Image: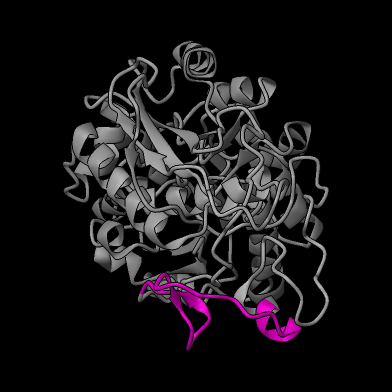
Amino acid sequence: MQPANAEGGGSGSSALKKWGPIGGVIAVIALVVGFVVVSSGDDNDDSAPPATDSQTTDNEPAGSTPADSTPGTEPDGTDPDGTEPDGTEAPPSGGEITYPLSFADAQEQGIEVAWDDRCDTELGTVAIKWFFAPSCYAPFDGDNGGATAVGVTGETIKVVQYQGPDDDPIIAYLTDAVSVDDTNAEEAETLQDMFDLFGDYYELYGRTVELVVYESTGLTDDAVTARADAVRIAEDFEPFAVLGGPALTNAFADELAARDILCVGCTPGQDPQWYEDRDPYVWGLAIGAEQSRTHGTEFITKQLSGKNAEYAGDPEFQSQARKYGLVYLESSATSTTIAENFVDDLEAGGVEISEFLPYVLDPASIQASAAQIIGKLKAAGVTSIIFTGDGIAPRDFTNEATAQEYFPEWIIVAPALVDVTAFARTYDQEQWAHAFGVSSG
């Protein structure tokens, strides 16, 4: 995991509020123990703190006593300042358990562990039939340190799930294209079920995750409301972490980071310095904008540069040297800066960009924008379109290209969701048969 999220101003893990909640759950469960595990107290103490878990579905802080549940998650062994928590040094061979202790470490050090039914001891992974099942960790017995961080007690870890309004037209534009019509309430129920599932198998050291759902009134590009939402979440709920955020403004993540609150998938892509300045509080689930551009630069300069547009749909283009145009999603000054840096890197590698064309993710104007952009590309004789936008706009761009009888190459540079079948089916297939490039997955 790296501190990067969506495409530069694009629609990564936070842009589709209905997609990818499992990624956020896994990310938080992978992070929480790493930040809050403290192996203090008597390891032989038989009384672990009671496990609790609850969900609040309005904008008020949870006030009810959480219900009992089984603990679980996988630690990564680091505190927020990057230091190792107490008790992480490897015990001597055959010695007593020092937490956290993975299955592999226990085997290597000859430590006997009473693995429970949460662990598949043949594989050494948690007993979920899943390709990504992580290592088992020794069942916890002892003092977990209690309130080791904001939002953490001896029994619970508070996590807030951000939701935009059900009627956000920008998000509806994205989800309607692939017939996703889940309500916020349905999404919250699914997320709680996921936390329950992972909580049953992961080692959370005597704690369970308390999920609070927060529904914003602001649209996905409303920076003012986003910052106000972050303030309210920080002050009213005091969580350990926040999942999700508005997809087209970084104000939400910026405010949470300023208040030292971890957030996952809570901002569109930013430049590396932005994340460094907010380290370690802003995390993403996908390839970063700068990372995708680096891959794209390598691919284009080393494999495509100086060659004909042999994969274009127009036979005349196939015998011509590639002429490139860049189409990118513009949601902020940062997205433009990232796109300009990409062009600089390409030109340094000998690739000239003839057309540099931004678009805005606005359902009311995207069709007209697509017509204008495709018209400019065709008039300029561009044989190869480099696309670094979102997963929905190719529907409008490819349909418009066919309408204008323009059949270039489509070179994708890790735009979010274009490699997801549900989205790609919405594109003009005659055009998309000539698409290739770097995947975000």
Residue 163 visible to an observer of this rendering? no
Left/right placement of residue 403 relative to residue 390 reads left
**Residue 98 placement (x, y as % from top left):** 72, 63
The extreme bottom residue here reads 122
Q: Residue at x 52, y 68 (%)?
A: 437
**Residue 380 placement (x, y as % from top left):** 51, 49
Left/right placement of residue 80 relative to residue 114 reads right
**Residue 414 placement (x, y as % from top left):** 53, 58
Q: Residue at x 27, y 38 (%)?
A: 188
What residue range appears in magenta?
A: 106-128
* Residue 163 quadrant: top left
Q: Nearer the viewer, residue 368 or 113?
A: 113
* Residue 259 quadrant: top right
Q: Nearer the viewer, residue 84 or 113?
A: 113
Q: Is residue 125 magenta?
A: yes
Left/right placement of residue 86 relative to residue 281 reads right
Q: Residue at x 51, y 43 (%)?
A: 49
**Residue 438 placement (x, y as % from top left):** 54, 66
Q: Is residue 118 above or below residue 142?
A: below
Q: Is residue 295 magenta?
A: no
Location of the N terminus by quadrant is bottom right
Please, what is the dominant secondary structure of the magenta stretch?
loop
Q: Is residue 435 above or below residue 12?
A: below
* Residue 215 quadrant: top left
Residue 81 visible to an observer of this rendering? yes
